[in-house]
Image (spheres, rainbow, N blue to C red):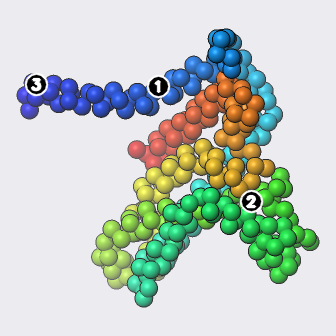
Amino acid sequence: MSKNEARLGYFLILPTVILIAGLILYPIGYNLTLSFFEVSLNPAKGNVFIGLQHYLEILTDYEFWSSFKTSVIFTLSTVLGTTLLGLGVALLLNREFKGRTILRGMVLLPYVTPLISLVFGWKYLFDPVFGMFNYIFVDMLNFFPHHLNWIESPQFAIYAVIIFNIWHNFPFSFLMILAELQSISGTLYEAAEVDGASAWQKFVHITLPELKFVIGALVILRTIWNFYKFAEVYLLSPAVETLPVYVYEKAFANYNFGQGAAIATILFIFVLGFILYYVRRVLEW
C-alpha cells in the first residue's frame, strides 16, 4: 500500500473517529467539569466554581460509603450468580436430548421480557402476605419465624434484588457460554476418554480452559453493567441504595447536579481501575 492510499484511508475514517470520540469524550468531559461547580437552577445566574469541595463532601459522607458497600455486595453477588448459573444451564443444554431447542428458547425469556413486566411479577412473588417466597421459606420450610416484607425491608431487600437480577440476566451468560461450548472440538473429549479421564477431569482440563476468555469477558461486562445498574434496583425496591440510586437522589431528587456529577466521576474511576487491573492481572491480556 502506498503512502497516498494510506493517507486516503485515514482521511475517509477520520469523520467516523471524530464522531465516536465526541460521543464518548464529550459527556465524560462535561460531567467532570460539572463536578467542580455548584450548579445553579436559575438560568439568570451562572454556575459557581468550588473546586474539589464536592469530592471532599462525598468522600466524608457516611451515606456514600454505605451505598458503595451495597454496590460492591450487589455486583459481586450478581456477577458470580449469573456466571455460575449461566455456566450450569449451558452445560446441561449442551447435551443431546429431545426438546432441547424449545428449552433453550424458554431459557432466554427472562432476558427478553420487558423489565417493567418482570418487576411487577416479582413484586407479587415477594409480597409479604400472598408471595410465593414467604410461602416456601416460612410456611413450608420454616426458615423464618414469620412472613417477611422482602421489598421494603432494609435488611432483606438487597437479597430480593440480587435474586431477581441473577434470574433476569443469567440467560445472557448462558447464551455466550453455550456458543463457546459448541465450538469445542469433540475430539478433545474423545481423546480424554481414551486416556481414562473422568467427567470432572474433562470439565477441569478441557472445558474450563476453553471457556476462560468467554467467562473473563462476561465478568468484565457484567461488572460494568451491574455496578451502574439503576432501573432493576430502583423499580423493584427503593430501599436498596446502590451508588447509581445515590447519584439519582443527589442529582434529581435533591437537585444537586454538581455533587451527582462528582459521584458519577468517582464511580467511573473505580470501575475503570477495576477493568485495567482485571484485564492485566486476571486475563493477562
Q: Residue drawn 64% across and 53% down?
A: 232
Tell me if residue 169 comes above or below residue 1 in the rendering: below
Mark 3 / mark 2, whichever is N-terminal:
3
**Residue 42, relative to residue 70: is it above or below?**
above
Q: Tag 3's secondary structure? A: helix
Left or right: 117 with respect to 61? Answer: left
Give residue 185's quadrant in the image: bottom left
| Residue 117 x %, y % | 62, 62
246 horizontally vs 154: left or right: left
| Mark toward the start of the polypeptide (3 vs 1) | 3
Instruction: State the separation of the CA atoms marked 1 and 2.
Output: 37 Å
Position of residue 260 in the picture relative to residue 171 (left or right): right
- Callout 1: helix, strand or loop? helix
Check disc 3 and give the amino acid type: Lys
Give the SS element for disc 2: helix
Instruction: Read off the residue under disc 3.
Output: 3
The residue positioned 47% from the left and 43% from the top of the image is 279
State the mark number for residue 159: 2
Q: Position of residue 60 (x, y in %)?
A: 78, 27
Residue kind at label 2, given as amino acid type: Tyr
Callout 1 crowding tier (Cα within 10 Å): few <14, some 14–19, many ≥20: few
> Which mark is on residue 26?
1
- Residue 190 got which mark? none
Q: Amino acid at mark 1?
A: Tyr
Residue 4 lies, in percent from the top left, at: 9, 24
- As drawn, which residue projects farthest toward the left? 2
Residues under labels 3 and 1: Cα distance?
32 Å
